[in-house]
Image (cartoon, helix red, strand yellow):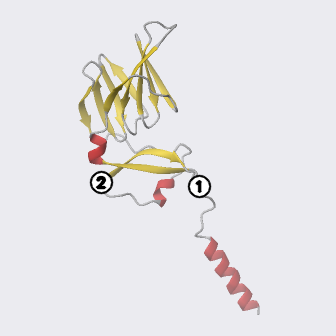
């Protein structure tokens, strides 16, 4: 009887060792390399700001990162009434800088230079940055198989 109890206890403990304590808080979103390279573009007009990130100021413009989505461009010529001029869509974007008329931003793992006058990508350097980590520093994505040729561009909150 003691042997059976011991075997059942070991079996139960061994079985629960492979069950995660909880589901991940965030799930990875992937994009094909081809789609990623065609994704950066300018969208004129106002776009709702849902998850603002870093802010960059270059007179008279304010650039606000929309985490994992791109960069809002706000004309601040009249600080009493700023004008949202447009949005540079760039999946995976979490950082940016401006020099002259060039907006430098990350397009997930790639560094992209975007001409603000011509409203177009002027250069892309692949695989400069590591993939973004989950917001809570979980390494949730290791539990998921990555499709071949795909790049992680965003973390979405898991809502079961």
Mark number for residue 120? none
Residue sitting at x 43%, y 49%: 29
Extreme-right residue of the structure: 1
Q: Is residue 18 above or below residue 69?
A: below
Of 27 and 141, which appears nearest the observer? 27
Q: Position of residue 114 (x, y in %)?
A: 29, 27
Residue under numbered circle 1: 160
For the residues labelled 2 and 1, the Cα–Cα distance comes to 28 Å
**In the image, 74: left or right of 26?**
left
Contact check, label 2 and label 1, Cβ < 8 Å:
no
Q: Secondary structure at mark 1?
A: loop
Q: Secondary structure at mark 2?
A: loop
Q: Which numbered disc, 2 or 1, marks the residue that appears first in the sequence?
A: 2
The C terminus is located in which quarter?
Answer: bottom right
**In the image, 98: left or right of 10?**
left
The N terminus is located in which quarter?
Answer: bottom right
Q: Is residue 118 above or below residue 124?
A: above
Residue sitting at x 39%, y 28%: 96
Residue sitting at x 31%, y 43%: 36
Q: Position of residue 20 (x, y in %)?
A: 60, 63
Q: Position of residue 16 (x, y in %)?
A: 63, 71
**In the image, 65: left or right of 41?**
right
Q: Position of residue 113 (x, y in %)?
A: 28, 28
Dot 2, how many residues are within 10 Å of its Cα: few (below 14), some (14-19), or many (20+)? Answer: few
Residue under numbered circle 2: 149
State which quadrant residue 5 falls in: bottom right
Count numbered badges in the picture. Answer: 2
Let me know if residue 126 appears in the view. no
Let me know if residue 29 appears in the view. yes
């Amino acid at each position: 009887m003691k042997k059976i109890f011991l075997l059942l206890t070991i079996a139960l403990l061994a079985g629960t060792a492979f069950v995660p304590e909880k589901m991940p808080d965030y799930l990875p979103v992937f994009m094909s390399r081809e789609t990623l390279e065609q994704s950066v573009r300018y969208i004129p007009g106002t776009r709702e700001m849902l998850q603002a990130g870093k802010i960059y100021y270059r007179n008279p413009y304010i650039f606000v990162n929309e985490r994992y989505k791109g960069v809002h461009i706000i004309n601040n010529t009249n600080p009493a009434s700023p004008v949202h001029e447009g949005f540079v869509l760039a999946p995976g974007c979490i950082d940016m800088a401006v020099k002259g008329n060039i907006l430098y931003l990350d397009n997930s793992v790639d560094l992209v230079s975007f001409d603000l006058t011509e409203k177009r990508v002027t250069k892309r350097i692949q695989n400069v940055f590591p993939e973004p980590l989950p917001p809570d520093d979980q390494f949730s994505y290791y539990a998921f198989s990555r499709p071949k040729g795909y790049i992680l561009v965003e973390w979405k909150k898991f809502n079961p």
